[in-house]
Image: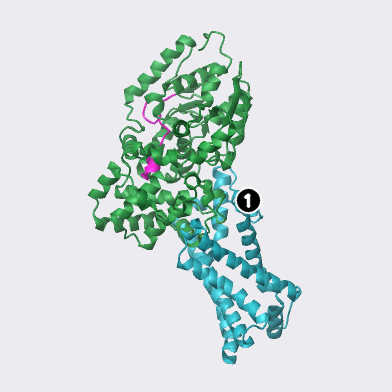
Amino acid sequence: MSTIADRLIDDAGIQRGLNRLEQSRIRSIIKGVLASETGARLKTYAETCMRCGLCAKACHYYMSHDGDPSYSPVGKVRQTMWEILKADGDVSKQQLQQFAQIAYTECNLCRRCMHYCPLGIDTAYIISVVRRICHKLGVTPQYIQDTAHSHAATLNQMWVKDDEWIDSLMWQEDEAREEFPTLRIPLEKEGADFMYSVIAPEPKFRTQLIYQAAAIFNAAGLDWTMPATPGWDNSNMAMFSGDAEVMSRVERAHYETAQRLRVKRIVMGECGHAFRAVCDVANRWLGWKVPPVPVVHSVEFFWDLLESGKIRMASKHPGTVTIHDPCNIIRGRGLMDKLRDVVHHICEDVVEMTPNREHNYCCCAGGGVINCGPPFKKVRVIGNKIKAEQLKATGVHTLIAPCHNCHGGLEDIIKHFELDMHIYFLGDIIYKHMERPADAGGGE
Amino acid sequence: MEQLYALAVGPLAWAAAAIFVFGSLYRLVRMYNLAKEKDGQALAYMSWKFGLRSLAHWFTPFGSLGWKENPLETIATFVFHIGLILLPLVVLGHVVLVEQFHGFSWWSPPEMVTDIVAMVVVVCCAFFALRRLMKPEVRFVTSGQDWLVLIIACLPFLTGVLAYHHVGPNLVMTTLHILSGELMLVAIPFTRLSHMLFGLFSRAYTGSEFGGVRHANDW
């Protein structure tokens, strides 16, 4: 049987961390994390897992590697947390490298396995604790660590400078006014109905998404604003690198920005992991049971605009589409019905892939895996053959995925397995096919 | 051997019952205190409604994705656990024993039925053992304790069947049967068999998180 030791990949960040690390520190740091940050949950999971292996079939990595047990959820926990507990934290550097590779690159924290475990053991939680340990030991993949550093330094993921952010918004406003002469991207408007927040890749290289969102809000005649200060980025890679301190700084800044602007709620773009950070994870670290400002994902927001008639479709997207359910907003927030309603509003015909809704297969990019960068690209592409098969079985050439990470991951899968599919965000289609304000130009 | 038998049905039985009850309470209270100290956010999300909803689905055969995709395991798991918990409570031998010592009794199914159920429980154990040996995803994660608890769970039923059918010296087999039953009671709070105590809570917590925070089903 193969194990993680048979497939180790060189990563500059992990290696540098290991080189710097003194053996004596390993045990004290691991024991510190276990004693101060874990309790009844981890203890219960470790003790009651019956090692029945029922979770194996849940995992896309396991399914894609023809049933290799070292990729099953419990197999991955056995090779990481059970080893740590068995050795009471006294593990070697070699083992640490294995733990880091499994925790950061072979688990998307997608939680599909919780539909398979009779005891409800949360593998994603266990793997997150392994990541936390790796982070505290400084053994993190270079690329994801870089994004975490960016969060620490700039409060956004992509080293976007303060003036570049404002500049990008003004640029998009300028561009959009060719098409919608009265369009504004309101900055720092206190008391607006909502603050629109995005992830840093949008100003960095997907600026058309900001353009489209502005066009949609303009067409719906909404009272909105964007902040001109750090706190605009809702993404959070520190959450996935195990850096809970930076994670919570980012999230606190996000909420405090919304509170400073006195908006009624935060509306966010089509992102999955950011939604997880904002609604589920970072608020806990900050001690907030529910976020202090209501957060609405764009799937819910579009649903509301379409159902209330604030946005009407002039035409529908022609042909047949299929829907990818992103883990973080479906298993993470139950938006599957609203997602389907929106897609049926804007597309002519839908073919469901199976399994779907809460039982969907992950894109294999989420959970910070795609952010571990090029050294691990193959891990996530080959590791999701099952998704390629699932997509192919629909016989459809258009895929809707309301999540940035899913886009990145699925694009790579589609390319590698030569699937001849095209992926859209909901915003792409709404922008293209909605009824435009009377003064608007002709569109594309 | 008769002395051992007397010890097994007398003081050891009381001791085993006491260790099971008080050991379980001790573990539950300790775990709850640990949760209060370290898992405050988990306790905050605990919900009766969503916890029980999740348990209801998982206590229904084929009521969850995991059960549906593993049909053989599902049948074996349900049959095994129902047999394991109900059989000792109603089997005639036990009811008679209670009547003999304490003067009260209750309904008991025909002995042929309980005999078959006991054999089925043993067969289920054999099935679990075979899975551990044959299925790579199970073998990969199996350790010594998994075998230990499987044997502990199987022994009372195996010895019970053998004693009932008078295989081997009757007194020896009966004594072994009693001792192995007591061993299981004692083992529940302190081995992986503690999933009997904690499994309800871990599943209910997952149900609470999925229902209350994530607004999604967890089955």
Label 1 element class: helix
Q: Which residue shows up at 52% across the image and 62% down it?
A: B132
* Chain displayed in green: A
Q: Is residue A387 magenta?
A: no
| Residues in magenta, as a range | A226-243
What residue is shown with label 1? B68
Q: Check the rendered structure and report the hue given to chain B.
A: cyan
Circle 1 Cα neighbour tier, 10 Å, few/some/many (<14 / 14–19 / ≥20) = some
Please tell me whether residue B24 is drawn above or below residue A69 in the rendered image: below
Prevailing secondary structure of the magenta residues: loop
Q: Position of residue A7 (x, y in %)?
A: 36, 48
Q: Position of residue B203 (x, y in %)?
A: 56, 55
Which quadrant holds residue A221?
A: top right
Q: Specify the subunit that label 1 lies on.
A: B
Q: Is residue A321 visible?
A: yes
Q: Position of residue B201 (x, y in %)?
A: 55, 58
Please state if B115 lies on the left or on the right of A177 as rendered: right
Q: Position of residue B164 (x, y in %)?
A: 68, 80
Q: Is residue A329 visible?
A: no
Please tell me whether residue B118 is drawn above or below residue A138 in the rendered image: below
Q: Given the image, on which type of amino acid does mark 1 rest?
A: Lys
Please tell me whether residue A422 is drawn above or below residue A109 in the rendered image: above
Q: Nearer the viewer, residue A115 or A298?
A: A115
> Looking at the figure, which quarter contains the N terminus of chain A?
bottom left
